[in-house]
Image (cartoon, grey):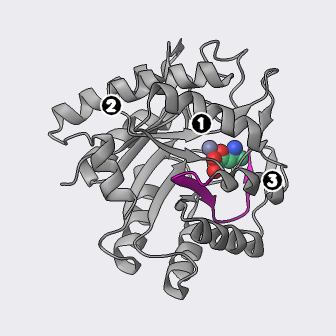
Amino acid sequence: MHPLIITCAITGAETRKSDQPNLPITPKEQAKAAKEAVKAGASVIHLHVREDDGKPSQRLERFEEAISEIRTLVPEVIIQISTGGAVGVPIEKRAKPLELKPEMASLNIGTMNFGDDVFYNHPLDVRALAKKMDELGVIPELEIYDAGMMETAITYLEKGIIKSPAHLQFVLGVRGGMNGDIKNLVALKNLMDLHMSKETHWGIAAVGRWQLPLTAYAIVLGGHVRVGFEDNIYYRKGELATSNAQFVERVVRLAKELNRPVATVQQARELLCR
Ligand code: KMH
Ligand code: ZN
């Protein structure tokens, strides 16, 4: 089985410092968190940025600063910027940091309820973002929150709107999308196996209490894994995690026990950035 790519989503847009005191906010804090995560075994950093007051931001200069700080401490790591941003941010702002031509970026493929908000992704905007990423040479990671988005991804791949083989991220456990029940993962994976290239890569980004069991499933089923404060702030019930790296370390231990090698940054780049 190909090696396991561990992505660390160090900051996110929703997690608050008041809920997770170890949340990295400033570019320097983010670089330190990225370095620790990579040292622990992560090869991809999924990046959101915040302003100094903690507010989520899609400001190009802030991304530039964060990427530069991360590159100083961990020059080799794959940086995947978020074009999802925060709920309610207009698509033009969300697309702006693509101008920095990061190696990868997230591409949210459909509209959904997101907790008590609406995460709006108009099909025309999604297709325009996909085109922009293609033109800029940015590799998209398709964020799939439910079966309808999976059907959309299948259509876009068939029509060449997104190049095959794709990299899919099954984001499970968001209120408004599919939860992290194994049956949901199996349903999504069945659609992938039926309709997509055998070269397709998929990962799991599971929210909160779903994170640990789905990590184990992904390791044994040949998927990749995302962890980090964007998706989960508790190491176990009632116990806040001390760092992003603490989650990565656990994934590495599980992978070792389950005989799945963990990808180096170089191997991750070979697998994803084809
Ligand atoms: N913050 C969520 C609304 C992404 O990074 O592309 C969207 C999100 C997905 O975090
Ligand atoms: Zn994100």
- Magenta stretch holds residue 63: no
**Residue drawn at point x = 79 percent, y = 47 percent:** 87
Q: Which residue is mark 1?
A: 67
Q: Position of residue 161 (x, y in %)?
A: 58, 80
Q: Which residues are magenta?
A: 101-115
Q: Is residue 172 left or right of residue 127?
A: left
Q: Is residue 129 left or right of residue 136?
A: right
Secondary structure beneath label 2: loop
Q: Earlier in the sequence, mark 1 or mark 3?
A: 1
Tag shown at residue 118: 3
227 vs 269, nearest the viewer: 269
Tag shown at residue 41: 2
Looking at the rendered structure, the kind of residue marked 3 is Val
Confirm whether residue 206 shows in the render. Answer: yes
- C-alpha span from label 1 to label 3: 29 Å
Q: Position of residue 195 (x, y in %)?
A: 40, 80
Badge 2 density bin: few <14, some 14–19, many ≥20, Cα 10 Å: many
In the image, residue 101 sits, relative to residue 12, either above or below, namely below
Looking at the rendered structure, the kind of residue marked 1 is Ile
**Residue drawn at point x = 31 percent, y = 56 percent:** 270
Badge 3 density bin: few <14, some 14–19, many ≥20, Cα 10 Å: few
Q: Is residue 269 left or right of residue 180?
A: left
